[in-house]
């Protein structure tokens, strides 16, 4: 299997080198590691990597460069998976990202997650293989209080949706919640129904369900 | 004895032996240097008015004088401030000769004032009033004093005048051709000299008091200076917090994340269950706890979301973190000046903390809006009410903070609720 080709954007030198090491050790090929959004876009245009991993706060304004670059890359390189690292939870960032493309091949993680290597790398792989990952902390905040149209969901359904938003399959969700995969499927079906997501061929209802949460903030 | 201004010193019995009469003389002398220019203006602009009054008193129509009157009035109103403001500045400096108290101007800070807005300022029109008063009264009073001094000189020099003159000299009601009676005049003149000290003292003192009353603003400006310095202090604190936040983020936080990552990498090469693995796991966990602590610390110093994304995003975060449901509405999407963002954020944060701690409310609402000239922050809840600034230091601190940016805090919290806190911060787009 071809190694996943990654472009890394992080303005802190220490962390950039540390992340490059980690990615190499887990079998990724780091084709470039840059320190700002401008170089990121240039390198992606040149290298066309499988995955872009970018910090949000980068020079010159140290605000949301990474998000803007990621949104742009969603349209210019839809085949490239993008994972952004955020210093703090900002649900607005997550929904901006998810709405930029078709909602797949995208990830929004808190920067602190990178130190849990196994989970971090698993999240990257989920995104590369077409999944969507939203940081559990973001999901936790969004789910903590029932809001319309989420008010109808039961506690169990919210738990299922939380795990769904983290990119888990029905089987994985079942394992986590100690219920059968069939039960998870039933919950997911109920969630879709309660959120008013009709079955359709060309729509990823799992992503739409997550988007519904994000839009209510 | 030390006095802060000449009108106090002049009542002191050793006044004449002090430097104060000389200060008075210096003040009066510098006024004489100014007077020719002022008199020139008075004559040029005043003549039409004199002519007009003469015509009216003789029962004639104004006729041809009217355009000159109008021109003169327009010149005074439009051009007056241009002369009066520099004159007032000079007078405030000159005041120092006879008045040691600080003399501040009472203009609105220049940063907010265009030339046009200068014409709308009370202080500028007070300067003009001073100029007009000086132009009309000063020539008379200073003329009288000049005549007095001239008379004294005449008395003192009278023996010489008589001696040099071949003809009898008329002095007041005495006519003499002898030097001896003239010596009496000279003696009288010499006795009068110390009196000059008092004349200059009262003249300079009176003039200076008028100048102080019209072209300075001691009380209000001192208060304004205190307000400004308070605002500057708060700005300095905010800038410092921001610097600390940035240093911690760019330095400590970054290095700690990198260190924790390295610990995790090191763990990969160590066999599970070994002593080294346990130690590394422990170190990794502690480093992670430290990361959380540091993140909370930085957030407490100054939330990054406020610095980077502004008020609306930061308030949304506050609402999301609150223990009770908080709805946020508002139309403040643009970035406000840092001082306002910090104050408004502080207001919402403090108000929501109060709601959670004291009100037993089921839900709260935050509304951010802009009105002409201000930003309005409203935090309401459906709790018990009865919030009292006198009992909680939170509301007092908030009120202080709001007052420092010239804003105001309005609180409605009847017993039984609901509570509404409204903070208005002055802001011009």
Image (cartoon, rainbow, N blue to C red):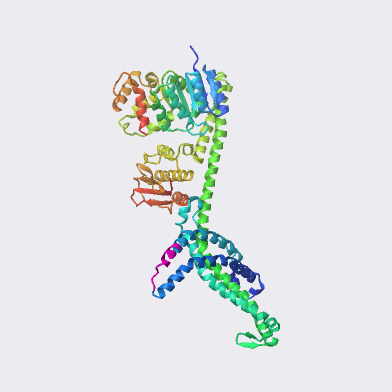
Query: Residue B142, relative to residue B259: is it above or below?
Result: below
Image quarter of residue B200: bottom right
Query: In the picture provided, is B3 more to the left or to the right than B292?
Result: right
Query: In the picture provided, is B375 more to the left or to the right than B91?
Result: left
Query: Residue B321, relative to residue B147: is it above or below?
Result: above
Please check the rendered image and state whether residue A99 is part of the magenta-colored stretch, yes or no. no
Query: In the picture provided, is A189 more to the left or to the right than A165?
Result: left
Q: Quadrant of the C terminus of chain A?
A: top left
* Residue B339, percent from left and from top: 48, 45
Query: Residue B78, relative to residue A137: is it above or below?
Result: below
Q: Nearer the viewer, residue B105 or A134?
A: B105
* Residue B86, percent from left and from top: 54, 59
Residue with the most extreme top position:
A1
* Residue B364, percent from left and from top: 36, 42
Q: Which residues are magenta?
A: B60-71
Residue B117 in view: yes
* Residue A209, percent from left and from top: 34, 26
Q: Nearer the viewer, residue B290 or B155?
A: B155
Q: Residue at x 28, y 23 (%)?
A: A198
Q: Nearer the viewer, residue B424 or B178?
A: B178
How many numbered marks, from 0 up? Answer: 0
Please check the rendered image and state whether residue B61 is part of the magenta-colored stretch, yes or no. yes
Residue A121 in view: no
């Amino acid at each position: 299997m071809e190694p996943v080709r990654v472009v890394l954007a992080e303005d802190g030198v220490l962390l950039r080198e540390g992340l490059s090491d980690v990615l190499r050790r887990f079998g990724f090929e780091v084709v470039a590691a840059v320190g700002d959004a401008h170089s990121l876009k240039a390198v992606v245009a040149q290298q066309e990597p499988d995955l872009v991993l970018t910090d949000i706060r980068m020079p010159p304004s140290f605000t949301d460069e990474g998000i803007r670059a990621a949104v742009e890359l969603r349209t210019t390189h839809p085949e490239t998976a993008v994972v952004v690292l955020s210093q703090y939870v900002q649900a607005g960032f997550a929904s901006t990202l998810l709405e930029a493309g078709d909602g797949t091949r995208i990830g929004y993680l808190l920067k602190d997650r990178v130190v849990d290597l196994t989970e971090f790398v698993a999240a990257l792989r989920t995104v590369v293989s077409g999944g969507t990952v939203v940081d559990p902390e973001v999901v936790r905040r969004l789910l903590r209080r029932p809001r319309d149209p989420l008010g109808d969901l039961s506690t169990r359904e919210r738990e299922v949706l939380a795990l769904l938003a983290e990119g888990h399959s029905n089987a994985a969700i079942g394992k986590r919640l100690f219920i059968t995969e069939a039960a998870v499927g039933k919950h997911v079906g109920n969630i879709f129904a309660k959120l008013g997501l009709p079955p359709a061929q060309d729509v990823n209802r799992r992503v739409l369900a997550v988007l519904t949460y994000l839009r209510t903030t | 004895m030390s006095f802060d201004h000449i009108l106090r010193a002049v009542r002191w019995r050793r006044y004449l032996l002090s430097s104060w009469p000389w200060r008075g003389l210096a003040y009066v002398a510098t006024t004489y240097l100014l007077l020719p220019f002022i008199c020139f203006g008075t004559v040029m602009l005043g003549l039409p008015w004199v002519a007009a009054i003469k015509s009216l008193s003789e029962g004639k129509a104004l006729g041809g004088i009217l355009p000159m009157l109008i021109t003169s009035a327009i010149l005074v109103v439009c051009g007056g401030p241009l002369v009066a403001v520099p004159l007032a500045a000079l007078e405030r400096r000159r005041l120092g000769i006879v008045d040691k108290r600080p003399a501040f101007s009472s203009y609105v800070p220049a940063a907010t004032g265009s030339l046009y807005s200068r014409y709308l300022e009370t202080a500028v029109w007070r300067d003009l009033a001073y100029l007009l008063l000086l132009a009309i009264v000063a020539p008379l009073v200073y003329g009288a004093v000049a005549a007095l001094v001239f008379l004294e000189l005449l008395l003192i020099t009278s023996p010489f005048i008589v001696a040099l003159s071949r003809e009898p000299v008329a002095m007041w009601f005495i006519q003499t051709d002898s030097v001896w009676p003239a010596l009496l005049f000279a003696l009288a003149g010499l006795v009068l000299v110390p009196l000059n000290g008092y004349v200059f003292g009262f003249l300079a003192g009176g003039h200076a008091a008028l100048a102080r009353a019209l072209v300075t603003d001691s009380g209000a400006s001192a208060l304004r200076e205190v307000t400004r310095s308070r605002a500057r202090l708060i700005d300095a604190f905010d800038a410092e917090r921001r610097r600390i936040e940035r240093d911690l983020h760019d330095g400590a936080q970054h290095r700690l994340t990198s260190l924790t990552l390295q610990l995790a990498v090191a763990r990969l090469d160590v066999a599970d269950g070994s002593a080294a693995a346990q130690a590394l796991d422990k170190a990794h966990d502690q480093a992670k706890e430290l990361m959380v602590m540091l993140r909370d610390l930085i957030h407490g110093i100054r939330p990054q979301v406020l610095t980077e994304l502004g008020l609306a995003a930061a308030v949304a975060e506050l609402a999301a973190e609150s223990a009770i449901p908080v709805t946020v509405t508002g139309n403040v999407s643009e970035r406000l000046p840092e001082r306002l963002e910090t104050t408004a954020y502080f207001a919402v944060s403090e108000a929501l903390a109060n709601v959670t701690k004291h009100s037993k409310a089921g839900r709260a609402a935050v509304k951010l809006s802009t009105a002409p000239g201000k930003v309005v922050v409203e935090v309401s809840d459906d709790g018990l009410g009865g919030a009292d600034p006198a009992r909680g230091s939170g509301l007092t601190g908030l009120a202080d903070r709001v007052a420092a940016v010239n804003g105001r805090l309005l609180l409605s919290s009847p017993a039984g609720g609901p509570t509404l806190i409204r903070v208005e911060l002055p802001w011009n787009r």
